[in-house]
């Protein structure tokens, strides 16, 4: 009879193919799948919470820049009246709130005269640079390099005003005010300074009337605004400390206005 296995040595068993474990691939596949899904869920949890944390802090401290440019002609006209003539403002100084997505938010400037905006500060800052350049030109001191100098001087003054307001709020344990709110309130200083420089172009002595007036009005505006708007976020109220800091902020406008209003090509007066 024909043997298809072939000849074998005595005592040697024929080779058998290895049998696969029916449970190995099942458990290994399930384990790797659980591991991958667990790591994926853990990673999404970490990066998702980090993303929400970053977004919440950005919205808290910087807010939406488009919010500050929602203005119209009526708002700009009325806001300039409040900044330059705060004694004539008979309405309230608090901002108008509205519920949105389960939290309280503030209406944009177009609907609230007390809301801060960046349109007026930006235009006032550019007007300050232009009027200062014209003033230097009338005295024969204007050069193309003075434009860069005036821009730098104005930005430094703006930064000093923002730093003053920010330090005041931090000293009162209120650091949740959006930074762009503070930038907007500080930038209103250029409206009064620009008015004084504009008057100086027509009548030289009007500068010595308009600049002190603008300085006093800006001090009153900041006192009213910070007392009713910015200090609303302070958790503890200390009337004595509040009044001292309000007075210091108002008095700090005097050297700032004198420095920015003195149009020269040097850092000092």
Image: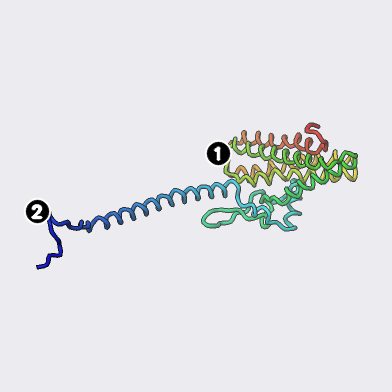
Secondary structure state at the residue bearing disc 1: loop
**Quadrant including the C terminus:** top right
In the depicted structure, whether residue 76 falls above or below residue 232 = below
N-terminal of the pair, mark 1 or mark 2, is 2
Q: Position of residue 114 (x, y in %)?
A: 67, 51
Mark 1 vs mark 2: in front = 2
Q: Position of residue 195 (x, y in %)?
A: 81, 45
Name the outermost residue toward the top: 268
Query: Observer-nearest residue: 168 or 86?
Result: 168
Give the Cα distance between marks 1 and 2: 99 Å
Q: Residue at x 46, y 49 (%)?
A: 47
The quarter of the displayed image where residue 222 is located = top right
Q: Is residue 211 left or right of residue 223?
A: right
The quarter of the displayed image where residue 34 is located = bottom left
Query: Observer-nearest residue: 70 or 213?
Result: 70
For disc 2, the marked residue is: 10
Give the image's coloring scheme. Answer: rainbow
Q: Position of residue 250 (x, y in %)?
A: 71, 37
Q: Quick check: marks 1 and 2 in contact, CB under 8 Å?
A: no
Secondary structure state at the residue bearing disc 2: loop
Q: Is residue 113 left or right of residue 43?
A: right
Q: Position of residue 61 (x, y in %)?
A: 59, 46
For disc 1, the marked residue is: 236
**Quadrant including the N terminus:** bottom left
Residue 101, numbered circle: none
Crowd class of label 1 (few under 14; some 14 to 19; many from 20; radius 10 Å): few
Name the outermost residue toward the bottom: 1
Q: Is residue 13 left or right of residue 105?
A: left
Crowd class of label 2 (few under 14; some 14 to 19; many from 20; radius 10 Å): few
């Amino acid at each position: 009879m024909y043997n298809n296995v072939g000849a074998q040595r005595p005592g040697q068993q024929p080779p058998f193919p290895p049998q696969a474990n029916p449970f190995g691939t099942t458990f290994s596949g399930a384990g790797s799948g659980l591991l991958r899904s667990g790591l994926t869920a853990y990673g999404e949890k970490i990066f998702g919470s980090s993303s929400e944390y970053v977004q919440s802090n950005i919205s808290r401290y910087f807010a939406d820049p488009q919010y500050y440019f929602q203005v119209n002609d009526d708002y700009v006209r009325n806001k300039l009246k409040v900044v330059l003539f705060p004694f004539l403002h008979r309405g309230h100084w608090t901002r108008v709130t509205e519920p949105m997505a389960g939290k309280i938010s503030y209406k944009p400037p177009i609907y609230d005269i007390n809301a801060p905006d960046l349109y007026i500060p930006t235009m006032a800052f550019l007007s300050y640079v232009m009027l200062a350049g014209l003033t230097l030109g009338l005295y024969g001191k204007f050069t193309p390099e003075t434009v860069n100098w005036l821009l730098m001087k104005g930005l430094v003054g703006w930064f000093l005003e923002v730093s003053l307001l920010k330090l005041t709020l931090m000293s009162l344990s209120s650091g949740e005010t959006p930074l762009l709110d503070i930038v907007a309130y500080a930038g209103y200083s250029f409206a009064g300074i620009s008015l004084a420089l504009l008057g100086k172009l027509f009548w030289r002595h009007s500068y010595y009337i308009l600049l002190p007036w603008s300085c006093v009005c800006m001090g009153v505006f900041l006192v009213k605004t910070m007392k009713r708007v910015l200090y609303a976020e302070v958790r503890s109220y200390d009337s004595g400390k509040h009044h001292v800091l309000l007075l210091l902020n108002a008095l700090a406008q005097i050297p700032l206005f004198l420095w920015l209003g003195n149009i020269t090509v040097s850092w000092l007066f």
